[in-house]
Amino acid sequence: MSAVGGGGVNVFRCVRPLFNRGALSPSLPTLAAGCNRGRTVRTRSGAGKLVRNAEDKKTVICIEGNIASGKTTCLEYFSKTSNIEVFTEPVSKWRNVCGHNPLALMYQDPERWGITLQTYVQLTMLDRHLSSTSASVRMMERSIFSAKYIFVENLFRSGKMPAVDYAVLSEWFNWIITNISIPVDLIVYLQTSPQTCHERLKQRCREEEKVIPLEYLESIHQLYEDWLIKKTTVPLPAPILVIPADHDLQKMLHQYEKNRDRILAADRL
Ligand SMILES: Nc1ncnc2c1ncn2[C@@H]1O[C@H](COP(=O)(O)OP(=O)(O)O)[C@@H](O)[C@H]1O
Ligand SMILES: O=c1ccn([C@H]2C[C@H](O)[C@@H](COP(=O)(O)O)O2)c(=O)[nH]1
């Protein structure tokens, strides 16, 4: 599918036949992707995951945070470092898939279009995780994990995603993380107040997001805090580095510089 390509040729090493399980099992573990670097994770059936030969050895850092918390700005800063390749969220694809704008549709009518957007987000984020890079460090904006644990969860919990849509997306997600190796070495959490994000969101002025109220950012914030700080929801796919991110731009750039070594040593954590 050309819309999600662009990351180079994906060469898999298949450590077991891909489709040998038969019907999708509802008993698949909710989160099998623990810190799985350097070894082949075994599924319940005793077979391994699909792994990418060289790519699985790269250091992977995911920058997480609320909408307009400053993730893209952070990535931009690190993009100037040699040996780091940054992968921004594929928002342009979410705004234009064959002339359709699922991001706008979701904000207009989440009950109808939430599943459409999140299915496409899941596909494009998986594509991001699997894309090739010649750099030794891959720095990504968000992850397939936050798409599910934050955005899908938020739609469902707020009553804006029907249970059947949530069930289908969850089965897709569980299949992916059970069968495909998605290594992450470090999650950098840009921790902001929802108010700060609301201000920055208004300043950024993305057309689709003009309808976002403060309460929406508060819900996303709560889910991030429960996942990454309180650790009360689902297991973490990697260690966490928290960077307070309410500060002005200059101070944030200073914070990134101060944390550079800790971030780039992610594979040794
Ligand atoms: N530390 C900061 N202080 C003030 N404005 C910021 C800061 N960091 C980013 N911005 C601005 O806030 C908006 C959102 O930032 P962005 O990096 O796009 O966030 P995200 O990628 O998390 O959605 C942009 O207009 C950006 O220029
Ligand atoms: O799984 C997802 C991921 C993101 N979104 C929305 C939230 C924002 O409106 C845009 C991009 O987010 P940024 O934080 O500005 O990068 O996409 C979503 O609905 N579902």
Image (cartoon, rainbow, N blue to C red):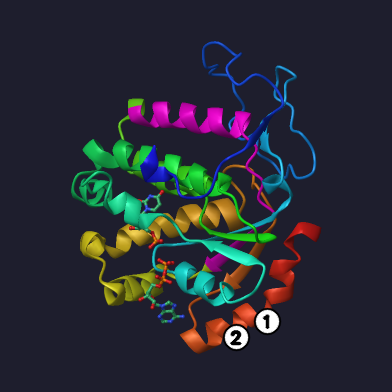
Q: Is residue 149 visible?
A: no
In the image, 26 versus 51, the foreground residue is: 51
Where residue 126 sits: x, y (%)? 51, 42
Where residue 79 sits: x, y (%)? 56, 72
In the image, 99 versus 42, the foreground residue is: 99
What residue occupies the far bottom of the structure in this picture? 250
Where residue 123 sits: x, y (%)? 44, 40
- Which amino acid type is marked by label 1? Lys
Ligand 2 quarter of the rendering: bottom left
Above or below, comparing residue 253 to residue 109 in the picture: below
Which residue is found at the position 76% from the left and 58% from the top? Answer: 267
Q: Is residue 2 visible?
A: yes
Q: Which mark is residue 258?
A: 1
Where residue 165 sits: x, y (%)? 34, 29
89 part of magenta stretch? no
Q: Quadrant of the C terminus?
A: bottom right
Does the residue at mark 2 contact the one at mark 1 (Cβ under 8 Å)? yes
Q: Marks 2/1: CA distance? A: 6 Å
Left or right for 227, reference 260: left
Above or below, comparing residue 173 to residue 205 in the picture: above
* Segment colored magenta: 165-190
Query: Which structural element holds mark 1?
Result: helix
Which residue is found at the position 30% from the left and 73% from the top? Answer: 204
Above or below, comparing residue 24 to residue 192 in the picture: above
Q: Which residue is mark 2?
A: 254
Query: Which structural element holds mark 2?
Result: helix
Above or below, comparing residue 164 to residue 261 in the picture: above
- Which amino acid type is marked by label 2? His
